[in-house]
Image (spheres, rainbow, N blue to C red):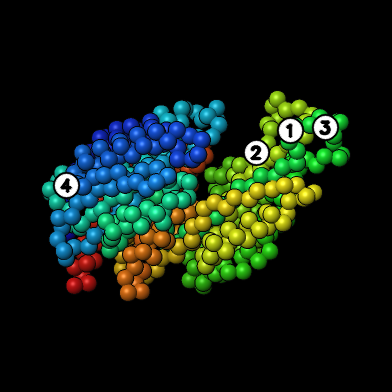
């Protein structure tokens, strides 16, 4: 199938898609608690208007109690013999963090040196536009699509999709598909596309420790009244070993070790530790954490890791000689392939409870529990995606893993697999190692974004062709 007209149409309309992206970046759709939920709803409404304007039908906000709204749209006129492709992205974003560390306002899209800066510019509002640009190119150039398409834009991915089970119960029937394409991952390098075939899982928990009804003078009471902030420090220190590895007893017992094929894929990638350290901004004398006997990519993609993502304690600025009455923290743990997230979360919570010192009162609140996911790298849809990305970028695409977690994948795949045959999930992305997703100065490489949009347009044709070959 010759699709030069699709390529040219998409390229000519990238300026329009950029305007759409910048408008979405301007909405502070932070889904975390403590931020304005009205902004997330406004983001969903803006996405719905965008889908309608670009030719999708049956556009609606999909809601369940307590959750931020998702957005749905479809185009289902390719015929019963054509595959149905579910295109996934999310419109919610992470908090901006310390806005003083941003070189430009986080919710004002700003171009510098070929990159577009702003919270959500890459993760994942550019992903929304990848789907939209591909669909728009086909409908503009030909008035039709080679496949049936459904689009789902989630609204709480960045908070662990905590209402996902209820969402699938309420709306899952309209999402049935033959393959799901998720544009929420990372390319290997700028200009080198990647298809992510595995991701880690995720669990988290909050805890609080309490010693007194109110703050106390550290001179009058110190040495007798225990310090909750110090207790939190002890609990957090107990979670990791000397090298930073997870130290919760038995935690990794159900982790699946990498296969020989997986190790071979790691070795085949040109991992550059110096370049990695520079991308991460790691200080010169700070070593890499984890087991030095394991490849760094294995540690990132296929081993559990623990991160303290929040601490409730006084800041140094304005602090006084006071024993705090209470303190707390939130801990996030990534899971290796094979790990059961419910088991992992239970172990995390019980370890925290056991580790609280000095008889302090404590409360542990379990959070998200998302299962790791590993796709079949030999599936025909994988080959289709690799061809599409290679053509779009002009160089061979590579198979990679990702240390992050998209909670939607595993439950959706489980819900729509047929007769024991797993639903194919194709995870592509617009990010690169310098994107700094979730960090300050998040950015999108604009040329790679264009290539990602082309890759999605080509993928629709490749998936249609693959179905024809099957028949």
Secondary structure state at the residue bearing disc 2: strand
Which mark is nearer the camera, 4 or 3?
Answer: 3
The residue that disc 3 covers is 218
Q: How crowded is mark 3: few (under 14 residues within 10 Å), some or many (20 or more)?
A: some
Do the numbered discs 2 and 4 sit on residues whose CB atoms are within 8 Å?
no
The residue that disc 4 covers is 139
Q: In this view, does 219 lie above or below 347?
A: above
Q: Which of marks 1 and 4 is nearer the N terminus?
A: 4
Q: Kindly identify the residue that appears in the image at 73 percent across and 36 percent down.
A: 213
Q: Quadrant of the C terminus?
A: bottom left
Residue 312 is marked as 2
The x, y position of residue 280, in whole percent, is: 56, 44
Q: Is residue 460 left or right of residue 426?
A: left
Q: Earlier in the sequence, mark 4 or mark 3?
A: 4
Q: Report whether residue 161 is seen.
A: yes
Secondary structure state at the residue bearing disc 4: helix
Q: Residue placed farthest to the left in the image?
A: 143
Q: Kindly identify the residue that appears in the image at 36 percent across and 43 percent down.
A: 69
State the residue in front, 332 or 3: 332
Q: Residue placed farthest to the bottom in the image?
A: 419
Q: Is residue 369 left or right of residue 230?
A: left
């Amino acid at each position: 199938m010759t699709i030069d007209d699709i390529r040219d149409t998409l390229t000519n309309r990238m300026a329009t898609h950029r305007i759409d992206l910048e408008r979405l970046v301007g909405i502070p759709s932070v889904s975390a608690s403590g931020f304005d939920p009205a902004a997330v709803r406004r983001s969903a409404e803006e996405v719905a208007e965008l889908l309608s304007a670009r030719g999708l039908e049956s556009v609606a906000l999909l809601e369940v109690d307590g959750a931020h709204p998702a957005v749905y749209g479809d185009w289902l006129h390719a015929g019963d013999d054509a595959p149905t492709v579910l295109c996934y992205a999310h419109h919610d974003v992470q908090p901006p963090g310390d806005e003083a560390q941003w070189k430009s306002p986080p919710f004002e899209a700003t171009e510098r040196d070929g990159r577009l800066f702003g919270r959500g510019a890459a993760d994942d509002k550019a992903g929304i536009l990848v789907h939209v640009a591909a669909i728009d190119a086909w409908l503009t150039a030909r008035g039709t699509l080679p496949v049936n398409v459904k689009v789902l834009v989630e609204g709480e991915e960045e908070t662990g999709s905590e209402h996902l089970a209820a969402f699938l119960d309420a709306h899952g029937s309209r999402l049935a598909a033959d393959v799901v394409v998720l544009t929420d991952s990372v390319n290997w390098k700028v200009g080198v596309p990647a298809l992510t075939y595995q991701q880690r899982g995720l669990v988290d928990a909050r805890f609080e420790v309490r010693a007194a009804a109110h703050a106390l003078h550290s001179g009058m009471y110190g040495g007798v009244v225990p310090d909750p902030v110090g207790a939190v420090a002890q609990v957090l220190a107990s979670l990791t070993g000397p090298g930073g590895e997870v130290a919760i007893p038995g935690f990794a017992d159900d982790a699946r070790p990498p296969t020989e094929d997986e190790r071979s894929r790691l070795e085949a990638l040109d991992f550059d530790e110096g370049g990695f350290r520079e991308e991460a901004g790691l200080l010169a004398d700070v070593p890499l954490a984890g087991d030095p006997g394991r490849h760094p990519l294995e540690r990132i993609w296929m081993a559990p890791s623990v991160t303290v993502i929040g601490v409730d304690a006084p800041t140094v600025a304005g602090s006084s000689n006071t024993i705090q009455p209470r303190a707390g923290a939130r801990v996030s743990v990534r899971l290796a392939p094979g790990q059961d997230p419910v088991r992992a979360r239970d172990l995390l919570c019980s370890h925290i409870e056991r580790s609280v010192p000095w008889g302090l009162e404590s409360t542990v609140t379990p959070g998200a529990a998302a299962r790791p996911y590993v796709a079949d790298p030999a599936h025909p849809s994988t080959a289709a995606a690799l061809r599409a990305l290679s053509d779009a970028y002009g160089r061979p695409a590579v198979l990679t893993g990702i240390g992050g977690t998209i909670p939607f994948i595993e439950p959706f795949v489980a819900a729509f697999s047929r007769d024991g045959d797993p639903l194919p999930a194709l995870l592509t992305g617009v990010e690169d190692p310098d994107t700094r997703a979730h960090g300050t100065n998040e950015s999108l490489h604009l040329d790679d974004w264009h290539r990602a949009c082309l890759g999605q347009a080509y993928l629709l044709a490749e998936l249609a062709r693959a179905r024809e070959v099957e028949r």
